[in-house]
Image (tube, rainbow, N blue to C red):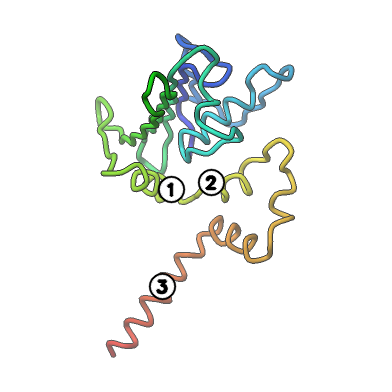
Amino acid sequence: MIPVKLTLRNFMCYRDNLPSLSFDGIHVVCLCGDNGNGKSALVDAITWALWGKIRAKSDDELVHLGQREMEVKFEFAVGASQYRVIRKHVKPGLGLSGQTILELQVATEDSFKAITVSSMRETQQKIIQLLRMDYPTFINSALLRQGHADEFTIKQPRDRKKVLADILGLSYYDELEERAKIHVREK
């Protein structure tokens, strides 16, 4: 996955009317600044958009103070295709329950076309398949979260094995093994 553009609206410390953060032409990034300036919030926005996971306890905590709703749009490339994930959340209020919406889009020649499936869970699975990575694999291979640098080393051996297998794409060999077994049975 190659980041392309990140757009935030009322997400954590970021308010409305912000310019999008374009990753065009950027190969290595270093975010630096004082504590509380929103460095981690940018990474949180990406993980929340892609996997709906973050360090906060609930999505309601992600909405900027005094606001009722927020939205993150994250565009990224996988192979030759470009995608956009839009995840929105509205806080509960006045007898209404909170609601999170997830949309997945693929770039066409002149715009984006929705490829969201029937449920949020199915759409989430589609995103994971596109990325070939779930959230635990991401945080144990590509991201060192604050206070969790040892997360991989303290995992049980079977969990470490799964993370490494996901990173290395070993499930492909499981598929090949299954196909070979079917082929042997047919013969």
Picture coordinates of residue 168 (x, y %)? 55, 59
Residue at the disc numbered 2: 135
Q: Residue at x 39, y 28 (%)?
A: 97
Residue at the disc numbered 1: 128
Report the residue that reaches farthest toward the front: 95
Nearest to the eye among marks 3 and 2: give it.
2
Which secondary structure, mark 3?
helix
Query: Disc 3 versus disc 2: distance between alpha carbons?
Result: 25 Å
Report the residue that reaches farthest toward the bottom: 187
Say which amino acid is labelled 3: Leu
Mark positioned earlier in the residue sequence (1 or 2): 1
Picture coordinates of residue 72 (x, y %)? 44, 25
**185, above or below 51, in the image:** below
Query: Disc 1 versus disc 3: distance between alpha carbons?
Result: 21 Å
**157, above or below 128, in the image:** below
Say which amino acid is labelled 1: Ile
Which corner quadrant of the image does residue 96 belong to?
top left
